[in-house]
Image: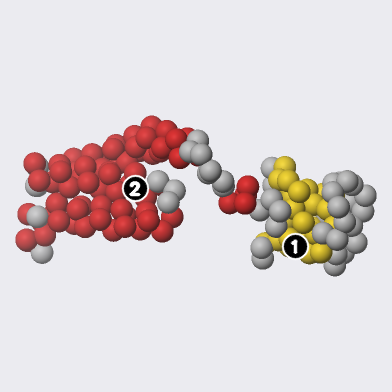
Amino acid sequence: MEWLGEHLWVFWMGLAAVLGVTELLTLDFTLLMLASGALAGGLVALALPGVLWVQIAAAVVVAVAMLALARPTLLRKVRALPGYRSSVDKMIGSSGVALTEITSGAGEVKVAGEVWTARSVEGTIAAGTEIEVYKIDGAIVIVYPRNLALP
């Protein structure tokens, strides 16, 4: 325990490594920003090994700054890359099933294993009808019967 107290930087660097590797599973840049905070805590631990509160403060300040400043910029740049499509954009053209009757005002569908609030492009779609996603409007999918051409 005494060794860990004198070498707390090992904990910080290990935490940074775990967060950095875990980021590869999410690709959301959140854990990467937290890893940078842990890295800062580790660097402060190397310089000031006995001052835990300064290490924690450095980690928190760097992580919050990275989350507030660097993450939005990175996300904006990634989303501006040619060919980028979000998971919501990829739903367009997907097929599903109408769970309830769908009108131009309301209804529910199941697409890719998820239940969505839906509206029809035109007319009424009966429950149980196979549908296709035409577009996404916020949290509502706009659909049409798969066996018919788009109106």
Task: Pick the quarter of the image with the N terminus.
Answer: bottom left
Q: Which residue is mark 1?
A: 96
- Are the two marked residues, 1 and 2, in contact with CB atoms closer than 8 angstroms? no
* Residue 127 can be seen, yes or no: yes
Which badge, 1 or 2, is on the more N-terminal residue?
A: 2
Residue 5, x across and y down, in percent: 10, 56
> Horizontal placement of 34 versus 107: left or right?
left
Residue displayed at 34% across by 47% down: 32
| Element assignment for label 2 | helix
Query: Front-most of 9 and 111?
Result: 111
> Horizontal placement of 15 versus 9: left or right?
right
Query: Front-most of 14 and 97?
Result: 97
> Horizontal placement of 29 versus 96: left or right?
left
Q: Which residue is mark 2?
A: 32
User: Foreground mark, 1 or 2?
Assistant: 1
* Residue 68 can be seen, yes or no: no
Residue 20, x across and y down, in percent: 31, 53
> Horizontal placement of 58 versus 117: left or right?
left
The three-letter amino acid code for the residue at tag 1 is Gly
Residue displayed at 69% across by 50% down: 92
Q: Quadrant of residue 68?
A: top left
Q: Mark 2 packing: few (<14 Cα in 10 Å), some, or many (20+)? A: many
Residue 45, x across and y down, in percent: 13, 46
